[in-house]
Amino acid sequence: MTMLQPSIQKKFNGTIWRLEFDELSSVLALEIRNQQDKQTSFTSIDINTGNINFEGLTTPERWLTGIECVYNNVLLLHHYKNESGPEHRAVIGIDATNGQTLWSNYSLAYDHLTEDGPALYNTSVQPRKLFIADIKTGTTKSPNNSAANKPLQNRIVIPDMLPAADLVPGSLPLPPYGNIVHYLRHNNYIIVSLHTQKNGSLQQHLFVMRGSEIVFTDLLNTSIQKLQPEAFVIHNNTLVFITNRDTINIINL
């Protein structure tokens, strides 16, 4: 049986902190945080072609910045008000195909993404009043109407968390530590993530199987101290997972 191979495999100088998929294009945006240098950077990948649109994009705010969303080939970034709290400030629109800044507004903040664009608000106005913005320009399109401006639904599929005892005996490549596996069936494939214990430390593995045959396997993490959350997602028939916290992998299923 033919083994699967990643169509994209990219290592970064830092921890992959966040992934965001564009539901209107093939862009995957990544937030990379380098704790040692206190530097946050951003990368855009075209999942369909495997091309890196840009990487290492930074803002004047080195550390207190992050991704809000990516939509219609525009990446929205934010700053944090302070290091000790989660509250966001500012909205910065970046062309997700080339990394060029399209617009920025430091009086606004992001609330959520709708089918008509991002819902933003002016941080100096109370009570909060949401409006729908043109993501390409940042200009106001209309006041937010919760009935008309419905939240955008994504196509991300996450695995189920199952007790290994619920599966057919002998169907797993390795006996899992903790008796819990992350399990998903997709396009005649079975994708499983599980933990094992070796020399007193935990390891996290990924297996892709077709029937009883293993067509892809990877060791995701070693020397970890506790069970990790789900290690993979499916988006639009692509398997996306991270190894060693710093390498993105994408396999077409």
Image (spheres, rainbow, N blue to C red):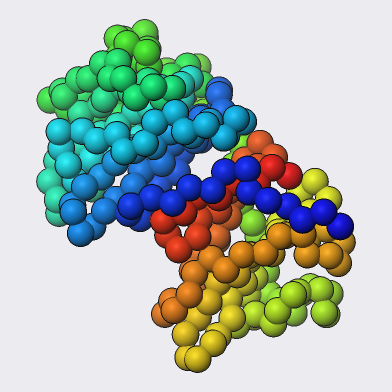
Q: Residue 2's quadrant in the figure? A: bottom right
Residue at horizontal 39 percent and vertical 31 percent from the top: 54
- Above or below, 131 relative to 35: above
- Above or below, 158 relative to 61: below
Left or right position of 1 against 59:
right
Is residue 66 or residue 164 the one in the foreground? 66
Is residue 94 or residue 55 the one in the foreground? 55
Left or right position of 117 against 105:
right
Is residue 53 or residue 183 the one in the foreground? 53
Q: Residue 217's quadrant in the figure? A: bottom right
Residue at horizontal 44 percent and vertical 79 percent from the top: 223
- Total tally of numbered discs in the picture: 0
In the picture, which quadrant includes the C terminus? Answer: top right
List x then y, in percent, for residue 91: 25, 26
Q: Residue furthest bottom?
A: 199
List x then y, in percent, for residue 155: 61, 37
Residue at horizontal 60 percent and vertical 30 percent from the top: 49
- Above or below, 226 relative to 136: below
List x then y, in percent, for residue 180: 63, 75
Residue 234 visible in the picture = no
List x then y, in percent, for residue 170: 82, 79
In the picture, which quadrant includes the N terminus? Answer: bottom right
Residue 46 visible in the picture = yes
Residue at horizontal 12 percent and vertical 25 percent from the top: 124
Left or right position of 102 against 146:
left
